[in-house]
Amino acid sequence: MWGIIVIAGFIGLALFHGSLQGIWLGLSFRKVTKYPDEAYAWFRSHDDWLVFETTDTQYIANKLPQAKLLGPIRFVVPILGQKEITVYGLIPHAEASWHEFEKNLKKEKN
């Protein structure tokens, strides 16, 4: 019974915020923590992503554009000396970019 209520709540939240695709992308972003160096390199090399090498929310808030954003995505990057970074994606382009990253990662890891 409670499981149905929780699932209905998540679906309602997703619909309120735009789509079920948002939940799928959230689950998909778990790959960032599994492949942080590759994700960091991808985000840095694509204009659809805003990368902040900080987690200072005040600093980031002052730098964000007035646009629809995906994020924040926060993760630790080993090649930066275990530094935690914050990433935002520019909607709608970031979603396509993320799917392209996943495809490239799958090719590299196979």
Image (cartoon, rainbow, N blue to C red):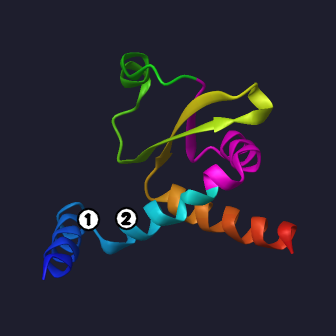
The quadrant the N terminus occupies is bottom left
Q: CA distance from mark 2 to mark 1?
A: 7 Å
Residue at point 58%, 31% (across, down): 85
Residue 24's place in the image compared with 76, above or below, is below
The amino acid on which the numbered mark 2 sits, given as a three-letter code, is: Gly
Is disc 2 surrounded by few (<14), some (14 to 19) or many (20+) residues within 10 Å? some
Q: Is residue 86 left or right of residue 22?
A: right
Comparing marks 2 and 1, which lies closer to the viewer?
2
Residue picked out by circle 1: 18
Give x and y (percent) for residue 49: 57, 43
Tag 2 near tag 1, CB within 8 Å: yes
How many labels, in total?
2
The quadrant the C terminus occupies is bottom right
Question: Magenta includes 51?
Answer: yes
Residue at point 77%, 72% (across, down): 106
Residue 83 vs residue 70, the one in the foreground:
83
Residue picked out by circle 2: 22
Residue at point 37%, 19% (across, down): 62
Secondary structure at badge 2 equals helix
Give x and y (percent) for residue 105: 76, 65
Secondary structure at badge 1 equals loop
Residue 62's place in the image compared with 48, above or below, is above
Question: Magenta includes 66?
Answer: no
> What's drawn in magenta, residue-wise?
32-53
Q: Is residue 26 left or right of residue 106?
A: left
Give x and y (percent) for residue 32: 62, 52
